[in-house]
Image: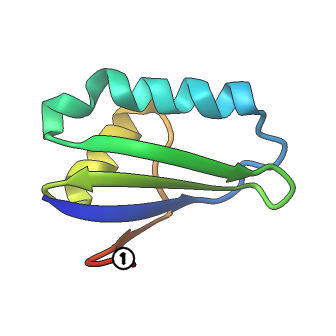
Amino acid sequence: MSRFMDVHHGMQGITADQLNQAHQADLAIEGEEGVHFERAWADPESGTVYCLSEAPSAEAVQRIHERAGHKADEIHAVPFSV
């Protein structure tokens, strides 16, 4: 499995509760695509949300986000970290 960081724009004013609800919506169906969303971060001022996942492909990540109602604007592979 590969790791991915995806980015959502235009979510100005998002609250911690709304971020949690969106994350839970992903978690509820992630297994159907072999995806696991590990963590999500948000900056309500800029409206940017970041999600870290392990998945077989960026397309699988996007399919889960689309089905959960919040399509990602960008998905980046993260081949290694320190």
Name the image quarter holding residue 68. top left
Where residue 36 appears, as percent x and y from the top left, is 27, 41
Name the image quarter holding residue 3. bottom left
Whether residue 70 is situated above or below residue 76 in the rendered picture: above
In the picture of the structure, the residue carrying the numbered disc 1 is: 81
Where residue 64 appears, as percent x and y from the top left, is 31, 39
In which quadrant will I find the C terminus? bottom left
In which quadrant will I find the N terminus? bottom left
Whether residue 62 is situated above or below residue 2 in the rendered picture: above
Q: Residue at image x 42%, y 64%?
A: 5
Lateral position of residue 23 relative to residue 82, left or right: right
Name the image quarter holding residue 32. top left
Q: Closest to the observer: 11 or 2? A: 2
Q: Residue at image x 33%, y 74%?
A: 78
Where residue 12 appears, as percent x and y from the top left, is 81, 49
Q: Extreme front residue here?
A: 82
Circle 1 crowding by C-alpha within 10 Å: few under 14, some 14–19, many from 20: few
SS assignment at label 1 = loop
Where residue 66 appears, as percent x and y from the top left, is 38, 41
Lateral position of residue 37 relative to residue 69, left or right: left
Q: Residue at image x 28%, y 25%?
A: 29
The three-letter code of the residue at mark 1 reads Ser
Report the coloring of the rendering.
rainbow
Lateral position of residue 60 relative to residue 76, left or right: left
Q: Residue at image x 36%, y 28%?
A: 27
Whether residue 33 is situated above or below residue 55 in the rendered picture: above
